Image (spheres, helix red, strand yellow):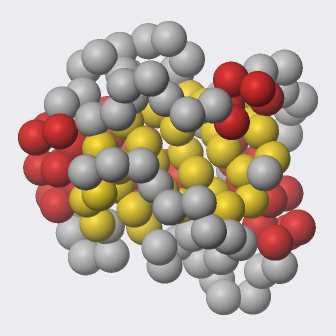
Amino acid sequence: MKTLSIMLIVASMGGAACASSSGADDAAAAPAKLAGSCSNASAGFCNEFTGASYTPASVERDCKALGAGIVFLPGACPTDSRVGTCLVRKRSSTESYYRYYASFPGTGTTTPSSAAAAAEKQCTGTLKGEWAPN
């Protein structure tokens, strides 16, 4: 899926302007439906695909198509070292949750607090999502 590829590529880049979020509880919540996840551990994020347009087969295919470093997970993203969550396209057929970790943005020089700040900036700016810290 082209949308999935674009979303993962955008998530691997730094964010734009920062805005406040009003849906922190929704962003942190576990999704009701989960077609699978694409994990990019080296970049410090994992994306859970919850919208109705996603199927386990389509998510797995698209994760694998993105190449080395992206791993398909049939379930949820890991919770260890997570610094926050971004809910994107809430209640749409392409809804997803970005889970960010202490290693975001994958430079190897971040602290949990700087990773969270960078992730929130990307979430509310570039992705236009709802941010919830862990």
Above or below, 54 relative to 44: above
Residue 124 figure quarter? top right
Estimate the x, y position of residue 45 in percent, counting from the top left: 54, 61
* Camera-nearest residue between 87 and 122: 87
Which residue is drawn at the image coordinates 65% and 76% (left, top)?
103
* Residue 22 horizontal side relative to residue 12, left or right: right
Image location of residue 113, percent across then percent down? 88, 67
The location of residue 112, given as percent across then percent down, is 81, 72
Toward the bottom, the furthest residue is: 108
Residue at position x 62%, y 68% in the image: 80
- Left of 78 or right of it: where is 22? right
Q: Which of 102 and 15 is in front in this view?
A: 102
Q: x%, y% of residue 20?
A: 89, 29
* Residue 115 appears in the picture as rendered: yes
Please indicate whether residue 58 sits to the left or right of residue 46 in the image: left
Residue 57: image quadrant is top left
- Front residue of this view, candidates 19 and 104: 104
